[in-house]
Amino acid sequence: MAKVLELPKLSPTMEEGQISAWHKKEGDKIDIDDLLAEVETDKATMEYKSFDRGTLLKILVPAGSVVQLGQPVAIIGNPGEDISALAGGGGAPAPKPTAAEAQPTGDRAAQPAGSAAPSGEAPATAAPPAARGDAVSPPTQPAAPQPSSDGRVRASPYVRKLGRERGLDLTSVAGTGPRGRIVARDLEGLKPAPAAAAAAPAAPGELAAPEVRPLSMMRKAIARRLTESKQTVPHFYLSIDVDADPLNALREQINADLAATAAEGDKPAKVSFNDLLVKACAIALVRVPECNAQFTSDAILVHRRVDISVAVAVPEGLVTPVVRDVDRKQVLEIAAEVRELAGRAKAKKLRPEEMANGTFSISNLGMYGIDNFGAVINPPEGAILAVGQVRREPVVHGEQIVPGRRLSMTLSCDHRVVDGAVGATFLKVLRQLLEHPTQILIG
């Protein structure tokens, strides 16, 4: 018996998802745990696997569609089974339109109330019955798909991305999806367009039209969570400047020793400033556990585990994979784990549980040349450390001015959890560790 497959909840905070790509096509046999599709959620691109056996009879939403939780996306059953009742609607809401599709167009005919059509096809207006004695005209052949006449590109962010990657001009592509939308299959076999001429400047007195970039699932989640954080969490900020010369010397010595002891032909492991900083923060959190805490309506939870969220920039925004039990790991373990997590974050291959339940965050923008900044707290954590670049500048040693290295850091604190004196104590301990960095290795 045919069965409708609905979009499942693939991450704890997921409310909707975008079908990035289908890995099965209509007519394919499906087994339990087969990969059906990839779904972009608010956290990452997740695998949607089958819980049933059968044949994929109908794909109800094309790749690129934004779908609500529980919305039907496909039908499976036995080959040749009649699915007209299910494919004809079955109460399934239409895929959520993109920003461009939400704009009304003059060539879109209104459909009669209650009409339904199989997903992926535009409903046809029924012709009135012929009067008795009238000649019945032969059925009209469906017109071939045509590019949009108004010059707008009706395509999802996923399809637009495919077009950019392949160098295609989507304005000349005829869409075969609902309401003339361009879907992924329309791009198959197309050749890259020649370089486009520069856009004509706006006429005097006119404003140039902006580029419209629809919000990705991740960007929507970032907007929602950061707005919530700034509106509900009372932030305050504490900054320190650290002598980074000892830390730099230790890092150079560690990397030199790693290179000297690496097997011939192997790429030697390396330790970054950030790896040493993550370990130093873990030691400081053990010594000042009040900063390793979160606020709840009934109590402050002081965590006994040290799980540090490390901010990683990705094209769609920012993700925070979590390094677990950092206080129990050596620096080389931390370095390898951070690199592995960051690589999978950029490939959108992190699992939801790998980005959840951190107890403290670190955001480092030093590699972008930023000296200092204040970061937004990642709820429900109680604090986040913002790290700038290691700066070369004159410093005072005794009675002399000599070349040196300085490192600026700012601790953003949730004032419901961390008081000023507690935050200052944490930074004092952290500075001592960084300026006497052998303690990081033995702490």
Image: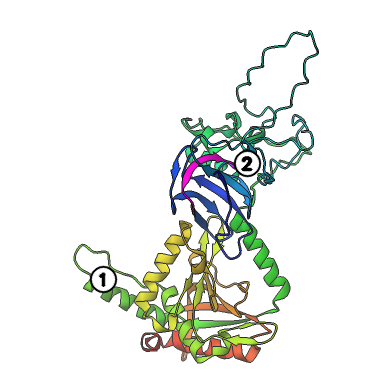
Density class for disc 2 (Cα within 10 Å; few <14, some 14-19, many ≥20) is some
* Precedes in sequence: disc 1 or disc 2: 2
Q: Amino acid at mark 2?
A: Leu
Q: Residue furthest front?
A: 1
The Cα–Cα distance between marks 1 and 2, rounded to whole angstroms, is 63 Å
Confirm whether the magenta stretch covers residue 132: no
Q: Position of residue 135 (x, y in %)?
A: 74, 8
Residue 415 shown left or right of residue 61 in the figure:
right
Asked where in the image residue 359 lies, by quadrant, the reply is bottom right
Q: Position of residue 125 (x, y in %)?
A: 74, 27
Residue 403 in view here: no
Q: Position of residue 347 (x, y in %)?
A: 45, 56
**Which residue is under mark 2?**
86
- Secondary structure beneath dot 1 equals helix
Going 72% across and 42% down the picture, which residue do you hit?
A: 102
Density class for disc 1 (Cα within 10 Å; few <14, some 14-19, many ≥20) is some
Q: Amino acid at mark 1?
A: Ala
- Secondary structure beneath dot 2 equals helix
Residue 302 shown left or right of residue 256 in the figure:
right
Going 71% across and 11% down the picture, which residue do you hit?
A: 137
Residue 219 in view here: yes
Pick the front one: 27 or 386 = 27
Give the residues in magenta: 50-61
Task: Tell me the quadrant of the picture where the N terminus can be found.
Answer: top right
Asked where in the image residue 252 lies, by quadrant, the reply is bottom left
Q: Which mark is residue 259?
A: 1
